[in-house]
Amino acid sequence: MAKIGIGIVGGGYMGKAHSVAMAAVASVFDTALRPRLISICGSSLDSSRRYQAAYGFERAADSWQDLVADPDVEAVVIASPQETHRAIAEAAFAAGKHVLCEKPLGASMDDARAMTEAAEASGCANMIGFNYIRTPASRYARDLIASGRIGTVTWFRGEHTEDFYADPDAPATWRSEGEANGTLGDLAPHMVNGARALIGPITEVMAEIPVVHAMRGGLPAGNDDQAQMMVRFDGGATGHLFFSRIATGRKMGYAYEVHGTKGAIRFDQEDQNALWLYTAEGPEAERGFRKILTGPAHPDYAPFCQGPGHGTGYQDQIIIEARDFLHAIETREAVWPTFREGLEVSKVIAAARASNAARDWRSVAEF
């Protein structure tokens, strides 16, 4: 089995998730490429050394520049704040290294476009970390919709709602500063990607992006708490997307509902191992949504567990993502979602901002 050297920039929430995934992926999926944890970089050398010891890397980097320049690092995972994504990605591609970047692709449309151009010019494998759409349940939902099981899709409702910033009296953090760190920049990309994956390209949006709490910990807030948009899809369906970081009681509200001419689907990430399916079949008195528990018959479930209904978890989504990234490197074939998908999501976000400012419908093609 061939080894591949992995470097990870960022060791916190997502840095740990990617480190664990790279350590486990070869065992779970028996991948042809076997990750070797070469280097990790935190916000300081001290933090890098802590992450090195905790996650099993061979060395700690003093800076992301040193990590990218390391000749043993062949692939870079970017799990640092989004304003750093562009510089790291461009340097990695220039050095001929493969890149998996956490969402959003960058802190702006300019970043997203430049990163996509650099990725495609390099010929290196590139992926963006939209992990929630990778659950076995959502993979199966995509299959059901694509096969026509629920007929022609007429309407879609999607949300990404959490309550980690629901208390306006809590101390202000980096999350309250900068457009890219608001709800539209931080949470919305996941469900925009989900809507595109399930239904298809979004062509037009009408958006509202309110700042609900004007003060954060006694300081003026600098970005949005919620966002919503009506959307039109390329295939003719319409829908509504809602995003919030102040949705009291919601912890991982990545949820959607799809209506078609022959049935409907419901999903909620807080119950990620279940999919609800309605089909307009049989006697009316016997119709209703039925709960499908995921198991080995569903996509990407069996490598984790042989027991139906036993379930997969958040970390497993990142392991699936690592498998896909290694496959893209091995085969030199693009594996969705690439940076190009990240750019398309960024275009929808940009159209939403323009719609909010103009108070009208905006075409995504403008961006």
Image (cartoon, grey):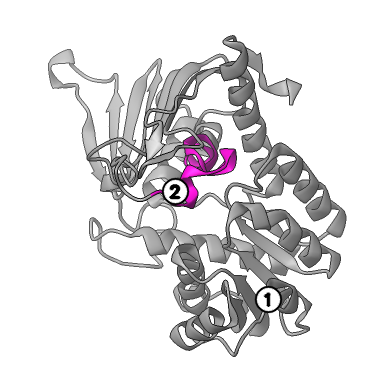
* Chain part drawn in magenta: 172-191
| Number of callouts | 2
Q: Any mark on residue 132, and which?
A: 2
Query: Residue 230, how many percent across, how many down?
Result: 49, 17
Q: Any mark on residue 206, and which?
A: none
Identify the residue at horizontal 30%, vertical 66% (top origin): 306
Q: Which residue is mark 1?
A: 63
Pick the front one: 77 or 172: 172
Label 2 neighbour load within 10 Å: few <14, some 14-19, many 20+: some
- The reply to whether dot 1 and dot 2 touch (C-beta < 8 Å) is no
Q: Is residue 95 left or right of residue 286?
A: right
Rendering quarter of residue 356: top right
Foreground disc of the pair 1, 2: 1
Res. 23 in view: yes
Main structural element of the magenta stretch: helix, strand or loop? Answer: helix
Q: CA distance from mark 1 to mark 2?
A: 30 Å
Label 2, secondary structure: give it. helix
Q: Is residue 242 left or right of residue 287?
A: right
- Say if the magenta span includes residue 186: yes
Label 1, secondary structure: give it. loop
Rendering quarter of residue 249: top left
Query: Residue 337, how many percent across, how many down?
Result: 62, 48
Quadrant of the image for the C terminus?
Answer: top right
Q: Earlier in the sequence, mark 1 or mark 2?
A: 1
Identify the residue at horizontal 18%, vertical 14% (top origin): 284
Q: Is residue 278 left or right of residue 327?
A: left
Pick the front one: 205 or 61: 61
**Amino acid bearing label 2:** Tyr
Say if 302 sits above or below 162 in the image: below
**Amino acid bearing label 1:** Ser
